[in-house]
């Protein structure tokens, strides 16, 4: 994660939160975001931020690291 900037890390954290929440919904029909924030504007905001983070995280697939050149003399 050393090549990630702060926005990348925030997006990744939100995507992980969303993934864990969906796992709980699928396995136990328990929505953790709704349990913590209620069924209101704050929960909707979290869902929107998680969705936007997922779209942003698509850019991670396009990032490539430069290959390390092996300079042997």
Image: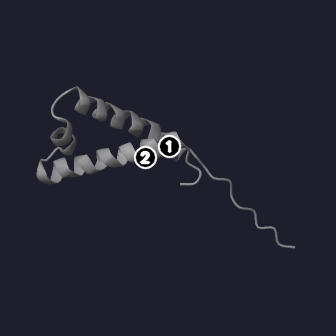
**Which residue appears farthest toward the left when viewing the image?**
29
Residue at image position (68%, 53%) is 66
Q: Which mark is residue 41?
A: none
Q: Nearer the viewer, residue 69 or 40?
A: 40
Q: Secondary structure at mark 1?
A: helix
Q: Which residue is mark 2?
A: 12
Q: How did the renderer colour the structure?
A: one colour
Left or right placement of residue 60 versus residue 69 in this view: left
Residue at image position (43%, 41%) is 11
Q: Secondary structure at mark 2?
A: helix
**Disc count in the image?**
2
Left or right placement of residue 1 versus residue 37 in this view: right
29 is higher (above) or lower (below) than 71: above
> Are there few (<14), some (14-19), or many (20+) residues within 10 Å of tag 2?
some
Residue at image position (23%, 47%) is 22
Quadrant hosting residue 10: top left
Mark 2 vs 1: CB contact within 8 A: yes
Q: Which residue is mark 1?
A: 8
Percent of width and height locating residue 19? 30, 48
């Amino acid at each position: 994660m050393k090549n990630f900037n702060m926005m990348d890390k925030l997006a990744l954290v939100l995507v992980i939160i969303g993934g864990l929440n969906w796992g709980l919904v699928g396995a136990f029909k328990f929505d953790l975001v709704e349990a913590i924030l209620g069924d209101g504007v704050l929960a909707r905001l979290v869902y929107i931020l998680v969705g936007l983070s997922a779209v942003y995280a698509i850019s991670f697939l396009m990032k490539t690291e430069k290959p390390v050149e092996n300079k042997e003399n």
